[in-house]
Amino acid sequence: MVTEPIQSVQEQDAHSPLDLEVRRILQKLGKLPPSREVPYLTVSLDWRSEGTSPGREPAPEVRPSERRSTHPEAGPSWRPAKQQIEEEFEALLEAHGPRGDAFDSLSADVERIDAYLEDELDPAAQGVFIVACQAKGLFVPLALGLTMETRLATGSIPSLSQLALLQDDHPTYALLNVDQKDAVLGFYSQTNLDQSISIDATGFPRKQQTGGISQRRLQARADERVAAFACGVAEETRNALDEEDVSMLIIAGDEVITSPLDDAFHQTVKDRIIGTLRLDNNLSSQEIGEAARPLVAAAERAREAEAIAKFQNGLGQGGLAAAGAKATLAALQVGQVMTLIMNDDVHLDAWADFGMQTYGVGKAPKKHPAGGDACAMASVELDELLVWLSLQTGAGVQIIHTDGPISASELDEIPDAGQAPPRSEPAMALDDHGGIGALLRYS
């Protein structure tokens, strides 16, 4: 009878220099109150460098007569995003200057962001996301393991749709790499290892040279030991997934151990398995994360299709779905939305009177629809307003990818000029409702 199949369980933090826990920070940013007088500045950057060396190109050669300067001019940045954002900063300050509370706050924000990018950002970052408002004492920088679209925005609320998209597309997942003697349960965020749990088995029975047990009894004890170890690993995995609130699990291992693992897993663990991998023993954690990335992407596309199916089934009188921008916005205002569903290319106008908590789709009307001050209505982007209201009311956000799959034959064909790229089926289903909908908590 096998007892105590597990010898040790050790938890280890990867101590990543990156900000991998996006979900918690996104929720925090979504709770920020509106700021009408002085805007929030939101910056996202694709921080990949040109070539192989980050930083800046060498400064132009200085003439002998000019070498007295103690601060030679730096060369242009090797990061295209840095050059782009510097130009946009200059235009932003020119538009808000030359004085005033908004100009002073934005000037301080730009200076603080420049200092962060130059001196504080870790070189491992592939993307950057920053929300700043000096007038409110706010500066939240995120060094990310994945790229983002380079963009600058100012407004009464932070622009959080890109961060919500990153969180939606790249949720934290677990990968269990296991053999007959040990197992490692790693938690990955943005394809980077965040933390891990190592599980080691006790020694296997070995046949002695003299007076040992028979080969058949030895094999039976080995099989018993593997089954017992699988049960121990299954229980540790279940507890860790529940504690970390992780809903995706990938299994890597040979059939000798994965078969008894499948028998030992609780159904709540089986429901979270999104695929299996075969991994080389010498892969780094970064390579393991990249190998798992297609499985996570496929699982996310499946979740999008499932959300659209629920949305379609909930349409109609008394159903648990809202269709279109106006109905979704109205449902968000009363806390009725459980999950916002929106195509990733929705960019429409909206307006908001944050003081009266009144919102509308399209350009702000000349007369306040609720009898308030028309000057209190601020222009906002509809997608940003919907994401902000979702975070304010505790609703989930499901952003649908519009890019459809491209077949091998289509890759060989040259598309016609102006031809739109293929769209995914979930996106086309939501296109019928303006690309916006919601699953509701109650009808």
Image (spheres, rainbow, N blue to C red):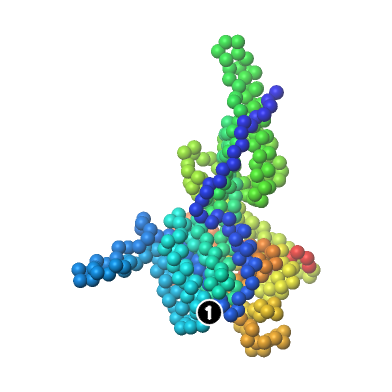
Q: Residues within 10 Å of mark 1 (few under 14, many from 20)?
A: many
Marks counted in the figure total 1
The residue under the point 68% across, 43% down is: 239
Q: Quadrant of the N terminus?
A: top right
The residue under the point 65% across, 29% down is: 5
Amino acid type at mark 1: Ala
Q: Position of residue 341 (x, y in %)?
A: 65, 65
The residue under the point 65% across, 18% down is: 217
Q: Is residue 202 above or below residue 88?
A: above
Q: Residue furthest top?
A: 211
- Looking at the image, residue 346 sits to the left or right of residue 87; the answer is right
Please tell me which residue lies in front, 413 or 49.
49
Does the image show residue 273?
Answer: yes
Q: Position of residue 329 (x, y in %)?
A: 68, 73
Q: Quadrant of the C terminus?
A: bottom right
The residue under the point 24% across, 66% down is: 61
On the image, numbered disc 1 is attached to which residue?
102
Judged from the image, the secondary structure of the residue bearing numbered disc 1 is helix
- Looking at the image, residue 311 sits to the left or right of residue 42; the answer is right
Does the image show residue 362?
Answer: no
